[in-house]
Image (cartoon, rainbow, N blue to C red):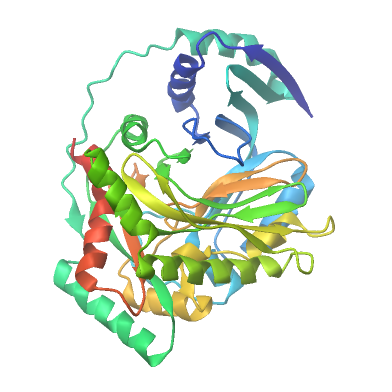
Amino acid sequence: MRTQKSVLLKNSKSFKKKLLRWSQQFDDVVWLDSNDFNQINSNFDVVLAIDAFTSLQSDYYQAFNKLKEYQTTTNDWIFGYLSYDLKNDTEQLQSQNFDSLGFPDIFFFQPKKIFFIKGNRLTIQYLKLVDDEFKQDLKDIKKVSLKKTNTSNNVKISLRMHKDEYFSKVDEMLEHIHRGDIYEANFCQEFYAEDTPIHPYDTYEKLNAISKPPFASLLKIYDKYLVSASPERYIMKTGNTVISQPIKGTAKRSTNKIEDEKLKSQLENDAKERSENIMIVDLVRNDLSKTANTGSVEVEELCKVYSFDQVHQMISTVKSIVSENIHPVDIIKTTFPMGSMTGAPKISAMQIIENLEETKRGLYSGAVGYFTPEGDFDFNVVIRSILYNASKKYVSYSVGGAITAKSDPLKEYEECLIKAKAMREVLED
């Protein structure tokens, strides 16, 4: 079905930049970049999938069944996304909130061309109907100019929810917690701009340069774009092993080395942040157990703090073993949406979130990634991301945080602003 070729690159860093710019001409694009982050669980430094041969696009109704059928019958690489609102398929919930982005609830495509970069090796896999285009494509990519573009967005950001309203809604969520309806919930707010054109590829390059996260992605579906600097993996399957790496716990960075170490240490020992993380780890363990071999779910890493360019983050790693007769889509269906973006108990948290938030989350809080022909997969969590509908000229980014019994509304609001900093910088630039 696919022709595979491999070449050594003289300058993989330069080629990577040219490859991304070259991809702008296509209507269907998924770009995944680990930014050379030193991960234990990493297959590639960069993946680019372009130009749909077949695709799946749908609303939430029966979405996982449709994906299961598409992944099975295609039996090939497929790339795409799962929006947060697929919860309406798995849990019979509803999303009535305002939505000005208009992304489909689910989108996957079988690309004609895939590029993988690992170190200085480029591997390409083209469907046979286009495999004669490889040499010309390589020549065209090498000719791409890396001259800096002087584009600026100069976006004027508006708040969907003002500060006092945010405090009021957090207080309402705390009432739910004190009544015992939930233990924790991820509460999000949207920042947006209307009638505002932006340059998605330039915006991605700027955002990625600021954050350098391990799960960065750029997604394009005709007129709709995701520009993501995600630090979080949702779920990955390699053979019979499944891992999920929820993030809960955030602290700002400092340019002063001593102060920075102090901030990191404070996060490591923060009782509230640790309790947030542990609650979500328990939820993830429960989700993974639905498809895992009995007794195989284990926590490999608990509340470990990792440092990124913008923030320190507390990350845990939960692992399970699945049998070969478990369909890969069922593993995702039984764990989606990810616990770090919902709360505990999960269904109650999602219901309360829906009532208190102003905006339909859509692709925010969803996941971008791929399935391999062997049924393996890897997906990020769509956070620290900008969503853009070019036809409507509508720009949006959302941020949130976990609300627990120990939450201080002011501190939660300040944490949101820390998370929003990089997106605001590149849009106002």
Viewport quadrant of the N terminus? top right
What residue is at 37 percent from the left and 34 percent from the top? Answer: 208
Residue 110 sits in quarter: top right
Q: Quadrant of the C terminus?
A: top left
The answer to whether residue 188 is visible is yes
Decide which of 293, 341 is in the foreground and name it: 293
From what the image shows, is residue 384 above or below residue 170? above
Residue drawn 49% across the image and 76% down it: 344
Q: Nearer the viewer, residue 66 or 141?
A: 141
- Residue 222 shown left or right of residue 135 in the figure: left
Q: Give residue 204's position: percent from left, percent from top.
A: 36, 34
Residue 239 image offset from top left, x and y in percent: 77, 47
Residue 347, position as x, y percentages in the image: 52, 78
Query: Is residue 396 in sight in this rendering?
Result: no
Q: Residue at position x 23%, y 46% from top? A: 259
List x then y, in percent, for residue 341: 45, 64
Name, please, the residue furthest toward the bottom: 179
In the picture as drawn, the residue positioned furthest to the right comes out as 325
